[in-house]
Image (tube, rainbow, N blue to C red):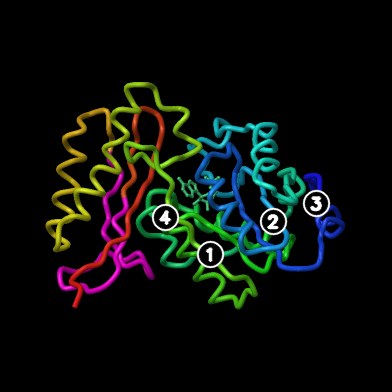
Amino acid sequence: MDLIVARGREDLVKARRTGTVALVPTMGALHEGHRSLIRQARVRADQVVVSIFVNPLQFAPNEDFSRYPRTFDADLEVCREEGVDVVFHPAAEDMYAADRQVSVSAGEMGRVVEGASRPGHFDGVLTIVLKLFNLVQPDLAVFGQKDAQQLALIRRMVADLDLPVEILGAPTVREPDGLALSSRNRYLSDGDRQVAVALSQALRAGAARLTPAEIRQTARAVLDEAGPGLDLDYLALVDPATFAEVSEDYEGLAVLAVAAKVGSTRLIDNVTLTLNPA
Ligand code: AMP
């Protein structure tokens, strides 16, 4: 079957076949991380829909919406190679009416950690994801652990709003030196690229320690060593269900998350670890 490019609901309805449908939402500029999500979807579903949409609602006015990479032709080629059935590529004006009023609130969990640095970001993310679910009507959807707070909030939305979609999380795909793949990595200069590896190094070093205090301290030291080329936004050790900072006696899974600007590019990364195992 040839790849179908859908622009709106009518195209999606026409393209729909019987069987299980999986959705992989993306903003395009597809890389190996996206490919791994698509492969996970392919294994689980009869029909795979990839959405490619740079969502203006999740960017603040001072952020990189206009600079965000748009490589649609190359993305289509990736989707063909991966056996994707439908690429949903709507126009922004078709997704958001000028007089729109209603949107999704991510609640308190949307205002901490990444949400504290990017006010309104997760409201924008959840609003587009809910719209995509309503348009595509998938049985399941795949999201990357790379955006751990986003994945947790999508699970929360599905639970809180009773959405009939199964959410699958996919592990973070990394460069051989540990840098998490990101569409934004293409903006790193050679010098930036060398500095950027400090994010994953800090997470790995932190995750090797045992207590929250040691974990935070160790990760922080690696980030400090990276020098002035790395402008730390936050380092957080949080409960994956709420993204609240964990206390020293916390037990169970935790997420160590970092965000930093390297040159003019903002990068995020995280690892999951277990604290005080019984
Ligand atoms: P984006 O196009 O950056 O909005 O990402 C689309 C989806 O791909 C999200 O669910 C991301 O979490 C996921 N993703 C991005 N980078 C990676 C990566 N390095 N490994 C795995 N998944 C990723």
Q: Give the foreground label among 1 and 3.
A: 1
Q: Amino acid at mark 3?
A: Gly
Q: CA distance from mark 1 to mark 3?
A: 25 Å
Q: Give the foreground label among 2 and 4.
A: 2
Which of the 4 image quarters holds residue 158? bottom right
Tell me residue 132's x, y (percent). 68, 58
Q: Give the residue number, with chain letter if any, for mark 2.
A: 48
**166 w.r.t. 180: above or below:** below
Q: CA distance from mark 2 to mark 1?
A: 14 Å
Give the SS element for disc 2: strand
Q: Amino acid at mark 1?
A: Leu
Q: Amino acid at mark 2?
A: Val
Q: Of marks 2 and 1, which one's residue comes earlier in the chain? A: 2
Name the disc covering residue 8, or none.
3
Q: Of marks 4 and 3, which one's residue comes earlier in the chain? A: 3
Tell me where the magenta segment starts and ends, as one range: 232-257
Q: Give the residue number, with chain letter if any, for mark 1.
A: 168
Residue visible at 61% across and 60% down in the picture = 43
Q: Quadrant of the C terminus?
A: bottom left
Ligand 1 under 8 Å from disc 4 Cβ: no
Residue visible at 18% across and 41% down in the picture = 222
Front in this rendered view, residue 55 or 44: 44
Give the SS element for disc 4: helix
Tell me residue 62's x, y (percent). 48, 37
Q: 10 Å neighbourhood of mark 2: few (<14), some, or many (≥20)?
A: many
Give the SS element for disc 1: strand
